[in-house]
Amino acid sequence: MSEELLAALRTGLMKAKKDEALDATQRLLDDGVDPVVILQDGMAAAMLELGAMWTRGEVFLPEVVASATLFKKCNELVEPALMAQGSKRAAARVVLATVKGDLHDLGKNMVGAMLKTAGFEVIDLGKDVPTEKIVEAAKELQPQIIGLSALLTTTVPQQRVVIEALKAEGLYGPIKVMVGGAPVTQEWAEDIEAHGFAPDAPEAVQRALALTAAGVTA
Ligand code: B1M
């Protein structure tokens, strides 16, 4: 049953059918399906498939914008359930940003929500964030981790720019940098000397826990 509902959610999201997507999301939640499964196997999977359709010229920008808008509405339903899973108090602070020039924020938002559930304090600087603003936040907020998301091959190099700027200010090291986003790989993360890379939001939580060593206290 939940497989059918997940499929309905994916189809609803890809076709930007508001009622279908929201109804499927609500029914999955009512059935007690893990919100992480709804996010990953339903919502994120739909956007991945939509991206492939976009590449093949089967959908166009306005349709992708409509699906992305609906993604955020589905997320509003899922996030309270996700937060209700969290029972640990924050032991570490994470500053999150989508790098300069990049407007993709759905994945970053998912990472932020799951980090909060795991007990992290998350300060989200938003999308298209200039490097200077990230460095400023690092100085002011003294986070344990800075998380950088990038979805475009043209903006991924900004992750290196941020790391170099943090190094120049003596902030890199005490503050760990985690990178992610669809085109980002472990090899790239190592190349730019990021402390961590995660291919998806659940893995980002595991990396953040590892980077903060003791992680979260119960
Ligand atoms: Co854009 N877009 N887009 N887009 N878009 C891609 C990325 C693209 C691959 C689509 C395609 O062509 N098939 C392509 C990039 C090609 C390239 O770089 N070579 C592309 C393009 C070209 C563009 C524009 C240039 C299009 C145009 O205007 N002509 C434009 C650029 C705007 C800009 O940023 N300056 C653009 C615009 C948009 C929309 C605004 C319409 C919309 C974004 C809306 C929004 O985010 N609010 C959009 C969307 C939705 C996509 C696709 C279809 C889906 C992205 C998404 O939200 N996925 C995307 C196709 C694709 O990625 N295959 C595409 C769902 C999300 C949950 O997954 O973000 O990957 P993702 O996040 C995952 C992991 O990557 C990871 O965890 C998340 C959850 O598991 N993760 C992290 C992410 N950040 C992390 C950080 C971490 C750790 C893990 O640590 C800190």
Image (tube, grey):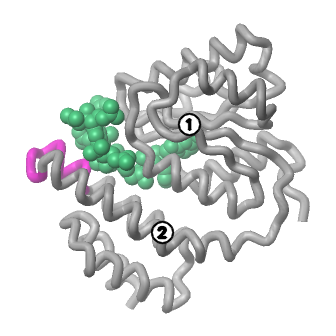
Q: Where residue 44 appears, x then y in whole percent?
A: 40, 59
Q: Position of residue 79 (x, y in %)?
A: 55, 69
Q: Which residue in the rendered view is the most extreme toward the left?
A: 58
Q: Position of residue 129 (x, y in %)?
A: 51, 29
Res 199 seen here: no
Query: Taking 103 as reference, is 12 left or right?
Result: left
Give the labeled residue for mark 2: 76
Kind of residue at badge 2: Glu
As displayed, is residue 46 above or below residue 5? above
Point out the quarter of the image occupied by ligand 1.
Answer: top left
Residue 53, magenta (yes or no):
yes
Q: Along the line of sight, which residue is nearer the eye, 147 or 121?
A: 121
How packed is label 2: few (under 14 Cα within 10 Å), some, or many (20 or more)?
Answer: few
Query: Of label 2 and label 1, which has the lower sequence position?
Result: 2
In magenta stretch: residue 107: no
Q: Which residue is pictured at 50% across the width and 71% down the height?
A: 37
Cα separation between marks 2 and 1? 20 Å
Q: Secondary structure at mark 1?
A: strand
| Of residues 56 and 66, the one drawn nearer to the viewer in this rendering | 66
Mark 2 element type: helix
Residue at image mark 1: 97
Q: Who's the residue at 90% across and 65% down the image? A: 218
Magenta residue span = 50-59
Among the 4 quarters of the image, the one containing residue 137: top right
Q: Left or right of 12: which side holds 196?
A: right
Residue 70 vertical placement versus 199 (above, below): below
Q: Is residue 173 visible?
A: yes
For this view, does 121 lie left or right of residue 107? right
